[in-house]
Amino acid sequence: MENETLLRQHLVKLLTGSEAHADFEAAIKGMPAKLRGMVPAGAEHSPWMLVEHLRIALWDILEFSRAAKHASPKWPEGYWPVSSAPEDEKDWDKSVQAFRDDLKAMCDLVMDPSTDLYAKIPHGDGQTILREALLAADHNSYHVGQLITTRRLLGAWA
């Protein structure tokens, strides 16, 4: 039981980025609104595109983990926003909050003692909650790193 609790705590730290890599909150803190839709030279995505991609992918992983009737977006276009910029500040704020909410929900799922981290997800093809949590953490850390690099290229990272 003690090892199980430790594993769950380590997974949450990995998901929240509080260990070996920057976290989402650090990556978005103080992001100037005028730069959110800009794709810098040498980069593929704007900050908005990365934030939206992070949100969509995490939502998909979370919903797959807990809902048999969940339908994933079409790959790859369903995982990226159509526009390089949010319509307005409310769009940015809504996306950021949705990511935060889904990250908390994923952490709650992992920390719930009734969640069997090792059981195959019934509607999957071999995935487990452990695998999905690791996938989310890996995906988040990669794109948070991209977001920081994009901010650096835009001159918006100290």
Image (spheres, helix red, strand yellow):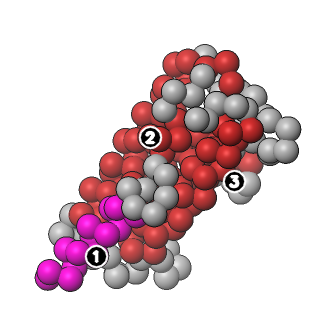
Check disc 1 and report the residue beneath it: 7
Q: Is residue 152 above or below residue 38?
A: below
What is the quadrant of the C terminus in the image? top right
Q: Quadrant of the N terminus?
A: bottom left
Residue at image x 56%, y 24%? Answer: 91
Cβ–Cβ under 8 Å for marks 2 and 1 = no
The answer to whether one can see residue 48 in this image is no
Position of residue 99 measured from the top left corner of the image (x, y, whole percent)? 46, 42
Camera-near label (1 vs 3) is 1
> Where residue 10 sits in the image (x, y, percent)?
31, 69
| Residue under the image location 34 percent in, 61 percent down | 13
Amino acid carrying label 3: it is: Lys
* Position in image of residue 115 (x %, y %): 25, 70
Q: Which residues are magenta?
A: 1-14
Distance (Cα) linking label 2 and label 3: 28 Å
Q: Earlier in the sequence, mark 2 or mark 3?
A: 2
In this orientation, does residue 95 appear? yes
Q: Amino acid at mark 1?
A: Leu
Residue at mark 2? 25
Q: Count residues near mark 1 (Cα–Cα under 10 Å), then give few for <14, some for 14-19, many for 20+.
A: some
Return the mark for residue 74: 3
The amino acid type found where label 2 is placed reads Glu
Q: CA distance from mark 2 to mark 1?
A: 23 Å
Q: Secondary structure at mark 1?
A: helix
